[in-house]
């Protein structure tokens, strides 16, 4: 949901030229060999965040179901 809220804002601020300049700067700073490592680490971080988010969501849903089961009894 947050992605859909911020997507128009980010695309409105950054044009094609700005994105190309940012990519060139990243390439110069990190070099061609470090970029795959950087992206791999970024992907791992995003995956861990999503796993933690899903675990919290599941725990909350389980708690609600347990509360409903106990109050119905």
Image (cartoon, rainbow, N blue to C red):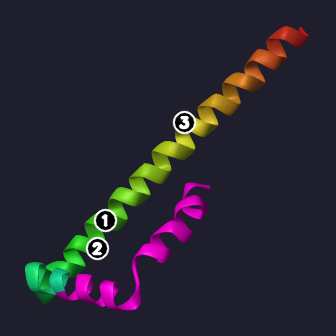
The residue that mark 1 highlights is: 42
- The secondary structure type at the circle numbered 2 is helix
Residue 16, above or below 59: below
In front: 36, or 70? 36
The CA span between labels 3 and 1 is 21 Å
The residue that mark 2 highlights is: 39
The residues colored magenta run 1-24
In the picture provided, is 27 more to the left or to the right than 49? left
Q: Position of residue 61 (x, y in %)?
A: 69, 32
The residue drawn where x is 49% and y is 75% is: 12
Q: Which mark is residue 56?
A: 3
- Callout 3 crowding tier (Cα within 10 Å): few <14, some 14–19, many ≥20: few
Residue 23, above or below 69: below
Q: Would you identify the image quadrant in which residue 57 lies?
A: top right
- The secondary structure type at the circle numbered 1 is helix
- Callout 1 crowding tier (Cα within 10 Å): few <14, some 14–19, many ≥20: few
């Amino acid at each position: 949901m947050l992605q859909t809220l911020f997507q128009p804002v980010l695309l409105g601020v950054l044009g094609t030229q700005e994105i190309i300049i940012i990519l060139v700067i990243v390439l110069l700073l990190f070099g061609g060999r470090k970029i795959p490592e950087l992206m791999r680490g970024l992907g791992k971080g995003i995956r861990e965040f999503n796993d933690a988010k899903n675990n919290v969501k599941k725990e909350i849903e389980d708690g609600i179901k347990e509360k409903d089961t106990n109050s119905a009894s």
